[in-house]
Amino acid sequence: MRRSIPCLCLAAALLAPAAVQARVAQARIARMHTPVATLEQVQVRLDWAEHADSGQLRIRAGRVDAPALGYHFRDLTWTCPLRRTPEDGWQCEGALRGQGVAQRALALRGQGAAPLRLGIHFDVDALTATLAQGQARLALERRTATPDLTTLILTRVPLVWAQALLAQAWEGASFGKGTLDGRLAIVAPAAAPLRVSGPLRLHAAALQNADSSIVGEGLGGDFQLAYVGSAAARVTVAGVLHGGEFLVGSTYVALPPAPVGLHIEADSAGAEGWRLPRIEWRDGDVLAGSGRARLAPDGNVRELELQAHSGDLGPLAPRYLSGWLGVLGLSGVELRGGVDMTTRIEDGALVEVTAVVRDAGLHDPAGRFGFDGLRGDLRYSAEAPVDSQLQWTAGELYGLEFGAAAIPLRSGDGTLRSRAPWRVPMQGGSLTLSDVAIRPAREDAGADIRFGMALEGIDFGRVSKALGLPAFTGVLGGEIPSAHYANDRIDFDGGLTLHLFDGTVRFSELALERPFGTAPSLTADIALKGLDLARLTEVLGFGTITGRLDGSIEGLRLVDWTPVAFDARFASYPAPGVKQRISQRAVQDIGSVGDSSFMASLQGQLIGLFSDFGYRRLGIGCRLENQICTMSGLSGSAGAQDENAFTIVEGSGVPRLDVIGFNRAVDWTTLVQRLLAAGKGEVAPVIE
């Protein structure tokens, strides 16, 4: 179209002498071909008043098609004053309107902006055409001596002007904001493909594909473009990017202000998409990569061979890995050290990965995990088996420190497996992982991880200190024969046993959702057996109670490590040789927690004289739901007369003391505050 309009203007100039005599000259052309465009249903009309120095030119084309550039217009109309120039040439400038042009102009301009204007100037030596709107200007120059060469000069040209050309190379893609400056040489010989080459400068560009799996914003850069248009088109882009951001699938890239080198060569494979025989990326010591690829028509990667090097992992996470880390729930992770990596993808599936890690570290700013001294190699293969080994010097998990370990690995058939169990020193004991099998995410399924786990001799006192719990003492041990991670959830078979206060605490039905993501969720059943109440209450600062305790916490659910649901019951039981006594401090603490008072026999007047009391039974329960704890006490007790009351402590001996609860529904936040106050001794007794 850019070349066809000058041809029509030339035809009008040939009509000008007749128009001077006849005042009006007209011509109709059924079809006109140029190397760039084809015009149909063309009408040329020139009105030229007698003795006037210019005439009014109106050109209308029913159809204008430039398939090599991707432009197709209907009912194209251009009106302008045609006049001679001092160089014995002609010039004409006016508004350009038509279906396709109007919509594109509307997308470009703001409210009330001027329409697109086309200007033509030509003589025996050269032809110049200019398309402008506001500050945007696209100038086309052709010289008679080189008829196949057209020079295109772009000044602040909106990217949407190139939308049709982009659609030719990338189906469904579209430009948004952004402008182009440049100078392109367009060679359009009659018997050879169209060629476009020259420098381009990109400002604040925005683009996306049809399903928004590829999106770019604020992209800028300086490039050399080389394009050959044909059935097997070829594009080469080489230069530097200046800032901006883009998303490709789950890969989010935030470019630095410093220039990033880029070189891409792409060959069209028709309906099969694109082949990229050369890809290069240079971001200093942060990331340097090279490789080749094949893309599907929608831009998705079908084949990829890539070699990458990073000597400084620190900036790598925020610039290139934040998308993937976010998917894994690891946003904000801090990296250091270096890595060399090779990757191969075939038919859209991961075939091979090799990563050589050098003195690397990985830390979560939220303190959930960390590794120091990571080194070794990690090899994944979907084909022939390969062996590797990764090791570290120290680490931590939710404040729990663990020591050096080495992981022997083998990969084949698309799974990464441990070659032998590996033991990690941890909190005075050890954690042993066995039968580890890791299958990376695929198109039809997410990552899948399976492993067995055993804990032995873990000092629970050290665990309590690390987690900010009361100073519990004991040993944590147990075995989970099989654990399975999939869909951001870990399910544990088997259970863990904690030897605590001369008794046992056993965890079963363990499951953990979003372990490193937002609001991690833990579910479990807990059984307590034979706990020494004297040692338990001493640690909790909850007065003194002697005796033995059994209990259960069923359906426990923690969200972001805060209880949201459970059904808990605890009860004492008589044990040979073990006294059952409760201190006055413990009585008032229990009373404060359970909205209770203590009721006495006739000896009640003497209660204040005693420091402790005998009891026959002790029991309390709480079923948490919707932030309300429904309280309960001993079953089958006759001490509570009100139907809403429940017995927590059933006394024995003289003086006999019963502790009765009178409020079965307690706000969970209030209950926690009471427990904390009781532990600090900040309650007073109530005697009825």
Image (tube, rainbow, N blue to C red):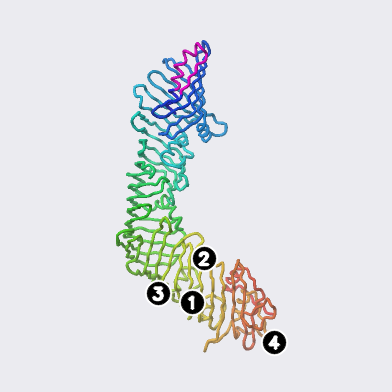
- Dot 1 or dot 2: first in sequence order is 1
CB of mark 1 within 8 Å of CB of mark 4? no
What stretch of residues is rendered in magenta?
8-29
Above or below 30: residue 386: below
Q: CA distance from mark 1 to mark 2?
A: 19 Å
Q: What residue is at 36 percent from the left and 62 percent from the top?
A: 415
The residue that label 1 is drawn on is 505
Camera-nearest label, 3 or 4: 3
Give the CA separation, mark 2 to mark 4.
Answer: 47 Å
Question: Disc number at residue 602?
Answer: 4
- Asked if disc 2 and disc 4 are in contact, CB closer than 8 Å, the reply is no
Label 3 and label 4: CA atoms lie apart by 54 Å
N-terminal label among 2 and 4: 2
Contact, mark 3 vs mark 4 (Cβ under 8 Å): no
The residue positioned 39% from the left and 21% from the top of the image is 126
Task: Say what secondary structure mark 2 lies in.
Answer: loop
> What residue does disc 2 label?
561
Type of residue at label 4? Leu
Q: Earlier in the sequence, mark 3 or mark 2?
A: 3
* Position of 171 relative to 332 (above/below): above
Question: Residue type at mark 3?
Answer: Glu
Give the spatial CA distance, label 3 vs label 2: 24 Å
The residue where tag 3 is placed is 456
Q: Amino acid at mark 2?
A: Trp
